[in-house]
Image (spheres, rainbow, N blue to C red):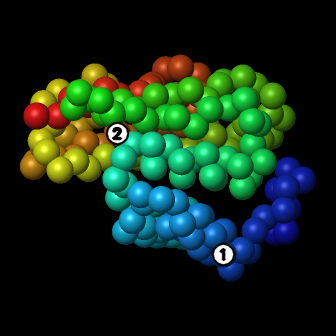
Amino acid sequence: MEKINGYDIPSKEEIKNEASRLEALAKNTIGISNVKTNIDLTNYIFTVDLDFQKITNLNAVFLKLKNSKKIDPTITTDYFTFADKKFIRNQKVPIKALYDKLKKTDKEVFENAKYTSVYKFDSTIKSFSNKKATPSKSNKAIKLNGSVINVINGNEKIENTITLN
C-alpha cells in the first residue's frame, strides 16, 4: 500500500533514513554520547539509547526534535528534571487534546499501540512513584510498560519520580 487514511506510508528505507537523521540530531547535541538506535521493522519497535551529562542535555534533544518536525511551539519539551537525587519524568504534552483533534480512522492507530520506557542510573533506586514501574534486579534501572490509548485517556501515567540512593 502507498497510503493509509490519506497519509503516505514511508518505505523501509525512508524509515531507516529518518532514524539515522534522528540519531545524528542526538549525537550533535552537547552533552549527549553513546547514541544508538535500533529499528525492528517487523514489529515496528523503535529504540533509542543514549547517555547524557546533564538533564538539560536530554531535554535539548527533545527540543531539537520538536523544532526539526515543526511541532507546535507552545508544546514544551522539558520532560525531565533532576535535583536532590530525584529524577522526574513529566508528561506536559496535551496528548488528549491533540488526540481529540484526530479523525476517527487516525485514532484507531492508537488502540493497540504499546510503549516501554527504561531509565538506567549509575546508583541504585531508593523509591519511585509510578506503581506500574518495575525496577531491575540490580535496582539501577526501571521499566514502565503500558498502553498508549490508556495514557491518552488518563487511565495510565508515564510520570514517575525516581529517588536515587
- The residue drawn where x is 23% and y is 27% is 84
Dot 1 alpha-carbon crowd within 10 angstroms: few under 14, some 14 to 19, many 20 or more: few
Residue 24, quarter of the rendered image: bottom right
Q: On the image, numbered disc 1 is attached to which residue? A: 17
Q: Is residue 32 left or right of residue 100?
A: left
Residue 20 seen anywhere in this rendered image of the structure = yes
Say what secondary structure mark 1 lies in.
helix
Image quadrant where one finds the C terminus: top left
Relative to 126, is 119 above or below?
Answer: below
Residue 132 seen anywhere in this rendered image of the structure = no
Farthest right residue? 6
Mark sitting earlier along the chain (2/1):
1
Residue 19 x/y as whole percent: 59, 68
Q: Residue 156 shows which numbered tag?
A: none
- The residue drawn where x is 54% and y is 52% is 61
Residue 129, quarter of the rendered image: top left
Residue 145, quarter of the rendered image: top left
Comparing 116 with 60, the one in front is: 60
Looking at the rendered structure, the kind of residue marked 2 is Leu
Q: On the image, numbered disc 2 is attached to which residue? A: 144
Residue 59 x/y as whole percent: 50, 43
- The residue drawn where x is 83% and y is 35% is 103
Residue 76 x/y as whole percent: 62, 32
Looking at the rendered structure, the kind of residue marked 1 is Asn
Whole-angstrom CA distance, mark 2 to mark 1, is 28 Å
Q: Is residue 120 left or right of residue 7?
A: left
- The residue drawn where x is 67% and y is 47% is 66
Q: Is residue 155 left or right of residue 16?
A: left
Badge nearest the viewer, 2 or 1: 1
Image quadrant where one finds the N terminus: bottom right
Q: Is residue 129 left or right of residue 78?
A: left
Farthest bottom residue? 13
